[in-house]
Image (spheres, grey):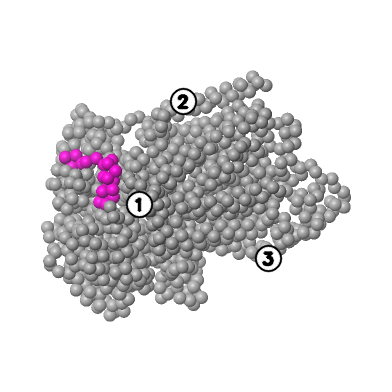
Amino acid sequence: MSSTEKFVQMFICIALFFGVVAIILLLTSKLRSRSGERVQFLAFVLPALALIAIGLLYPAIVTIYRSFQDNTGTDFVGIDNYHTVFTDSEQLRVLRNTAAWVLLVPTVSTFIGLVYAVLVDRARLEKFAKGLIFLPMAISLVGASLIWKFVYDYKDKSVDQIGLANQILKSLGFDTYQFLLTEPWNTLFLIVIMIWVQAGFAMTILSASIKAIPDDIIEAARLDGVSGLKMFRYITIPSIRPSLIVVITTISITTLKAFDIVRTATGGNFDTSVLAYEFYVQSFRSNNAGLGAALAVIIFILVLPIVVYNVRQMRRLEAR
Amino acid sequence: MTVADSVSVEAVVEKETASSRAHKTLTSPWASIAAIAIAVLWTIPTIGLFITSFRPEQDVKTTGWWTVLQNPGLGGLTWANYDAVLHGADTDLAVYFVNTIVITIPSVLMPISLAVIAAYAFSWMSFPGRDFLFVAVFALQIVPIQVTMIPLLKLYVQPPFNLQPLAGADAPGGGFYTIWLSHTIFALPLAIYLLHNFMSQIPGELIESARVDGAGHVQIFTRIMLPLMTPAIAAFAIFQFLWVWNDLLVALVFGGGSLDVSPLTVRLAELSGTKGQDWHLLSAGAFVSLVVPLIVFLSLQRFFVRGLLAGSVKG
Amino acid sequence: MRTRNTRRVAAVAAAVLGAGLALASCADDNKGGGSASGTWPGADKSECKDLEQLADFGDLSGREVSVYTSIVAPEDQSQKDSYKLFTTCTGAKVNYEGSKEFEAQLPVRVQAGNPPDIAYVPQPGLLKTLVATGKVVEAPSAVADNVDKWFGEDWKGYGTVDDKFYAAPLGANVKSFVWYSPKMFADNGWEVPSTWDDMLALSDTIAGTGIKPWCAGIESGEATGWPATDWLEDVLLRTSGPDVYDDWVNHDIPFNDPQVAEALDDVGNILKNDKYVNGGIGDVKSIATTAFQDAGLPILDGKCALHRQAGFYAANWPEGTKVAEDGDVFAFYLPTMSDEFGKPVLGGGEFVTAFSDNAEVQAFQTYLSTDVWANEKAKATPGGGWVSANTGLDVTNLVSPIDQLSAQIFQDPDAVFRFDGSDQMPGEVGANSFWKEMTAWITGESTQDALDNIEKSWPSS
């Protein structure tokens, strides 16, 4: 296919989709009644829901089914796969690591993203400043892992260093340190990589949110003598609370699914493995499809607390 | 909370001094120092990568990149890595670039178009079980792509009801449809979630006053919602663009890998060689790939406009 | 109002329909097919005279064969170049796709019903898994005949599953090498050792001069640990011989059999010996975090003397390094411990696996199994770095001395070839626990624990 043909296909596709949306809007534009609203609702959500059902829900159900089968997919083994996950001592360490990731990454990245967004709001060079924090997001998780692998590189103290971290240690007179090898801190050093990437996401969303705070509210608060840290605590944070929840939720879910960092930096060795990586290994290297599916289902279940938290927050906001 | 709608002269004066006071607090030296510290810390690894991309292979493997700073002068630097990235493949890099663009643009626009109407419905229309559906949608964000690979691929290769297969030798559009559809599917839960968040923050009074004026949902959506949603759509567009631009897995799995559809990431992934981890090439490749998303980010920043809602509510 | 709306809807609907029709018309033409007829394009061409086998397939012009492999740039270029003769002589084109995600993606494509025509499978274990899906097609008889003619029995065995022959060997590499610097040896008066004991004595001598003789690195992303598995396999072949090796690989003896433990301890005498490792890099543990590609480099600075690694390591030396017997670096055959078992050679390679029995696919398989292709490929690789176990390969076509050495070793009648063990074991072991436990072993785990853990992980089916 030539480039022109490809671009033609692209425009056809875009036209198709926008066309579908336009049709939906046009066809439902005259509806006004109660039942009319219900029809409108269905018309508006059905395309998205249909795609999600086929592409996400159906595979999820297939996976749940698969987790109760053995590895070749022929016999039912009930909860054997789950039993393996929870009794193997190595797997328990994996669960512990995953917990560390899910607790630290969302909180720290959101915190840094928020603070930075507030600090550079309205400053000169704001776009440039935000671009710097955003850069890691533009690099891809594998790329970010390789960069930090380089930073953490270890060579004996007597030899020239290639890794920045050990160079700093060496210049300060310390011994060089095996960042990726030494348990249990190596997990923390991997978590740093994820935070480095996700802070940009938090910053971008929260920045948009901060800018959406109506000026009237800020002015009124200033008239009341509120400024600086108090402004941050009593005006900014409550106003962007829904976005904070969204950011923390999204980063938590991304963290639960991410395994590229572990895969690239340590290959899951030295006690750094997380659930998502184990799922990948069992499904694609060990040909243990049943065990892999069970691990995936556990990841699904781990999203439930996040969902519950969100629902509670939603109800609270609506009640106001 | 008082809305400064009708103002008196004194109030205006008050406002101005309060504003300049606040401005001083914001630009206080501590705030600047803190911001700079964070920015520097964040950028150092990337700077290291940038410098590495200009160093010859032997240097990269034996000494740290900071040694370049110690020996100022551009003696040791070279364009060789970029040359290898841009011209090393037997296929022109332009082909990969075209593929990436062709893959990315619909993969950004399609989920936005579907998500924005769905998010509106979830925010402002009533329907029994609406909240449950919404929770189900955003909870499905948790499904990892790997879990969907085989079931979706099977559907693409042999769709039920004798529909046109989207993958394989008879694929329409040269096989791009599988990639577009897959990217759209994976983006929808987050898109709906994010857009819904921004949409529900729009004051209900706006909608009400429009209703009172006789507008139906479609009119409210097109005339009020969409303009107000530009920052949110821009925010999501940035991430979706970025994510698709950097994506390797979806293109590999659903694209079937022929040169007709392979994006830039495929080429860059190969850079490290069959058995290698050629750092000097990877760093150059990373920067070649980084340029466009960065431009997109900086240019979409102008949609992050403040005060879209200021003064729009009458007290 | 109503008419305006209806017109709008009609307009949009028409646009959508039009788009749908446009895309439906863009479906590609069918590319596969059954047997062909017609005159063979190579009939009048002198360069095709050794490929008369392909005449049976007739005229394949316009047909395409899709090939999927893990061989990416820059090695893929010479592959593609070597197929040109095939296209000239049969008319069929080859669409080559290389990917580093090959091992993960191929099973996905096969299971989803979208396999390539041919895949170059680098592990017999993976071949077994694929055959079990039922989607692999048996090799045509022409290929089987070629393999009988040009390759040793062992090679055919690796492409056979349950007595059916599926996949012919493609390229190969020798793993039983020790890299060293001829200059360093000459300067110090050291000799290339011809027995294992000599090698250990040499290590002591080198250690005496103040540098650590051996450098090693097993880091490799998610595959971290694989070089250590090669060490164990090479040593086991020398301590207990090829038969015990085969039993071990096929799980006829347990993974933690005492013979294996003995071999692993022999490896430990080198790899876990503070006086011997890790030259130019650090301590024993640094082996686990040093990338395998970088591990041999200290030899160039004189900080290390010996590095055990496969022939393909030649690609990792910086540009300008002379890889030759009188050059900056070269490799010697990893010595044996006794004469009992001949000259064991550990190595790897790829196998041509087909998922379709179309004429053009079978023709391509046949082409790849001939001596003609082996020589074409050698000639298409001016930079060196490729070898085949095809005995029809003319060694003089190989450019690089290390490739020539590898080919000579393959063609040596005393050589006893064995394929890499971890590549033959089930994925749970060969692509998971074996790697992981070797890594843990380097960083302190005991020999017994490591082997016990691997034995525990062997799938029970």
- In reply to whether residue C70 is colored magenta, the answer given is no
Q: What amino acid is found at the position of numbered circle 2 in the picture?
A: Leu
How far apart in space, not on screen, are marks 1 and 3 (Cα)?
55 Å
Disc 2 from disc 1: Cα separation: 43 Å
Closer mark to the observer between disc 2 and disc 3: 2
Q: Residue A290's x, y, as percent?
A: 37, 50
Q: Quadrant of the N terminus of chain A?
A: top left
**Is residue C133 on the magenta stretch?**
yes
Q: Which mark is residue B30?
A: 3
Can residue C181 be seen in the rendering of this structure?
no
The residue that disc 2 covers is: C21
**To which residue does mark 1 refer?**
A288
Q: Residue furthest front?
A: A78
Q: Residue at x 47, y 70 (%)?
A: A166
Question: Residue visible at 53% across and 56% down?
Answer: A197
Q: Residues within 10 Å of mark 2 (few under 14, many from 20)?
A: few
How far is the residue under mark 2 from the one under mark 3?
63 Å
Identified at 28% across, 50% down, the residue is C126
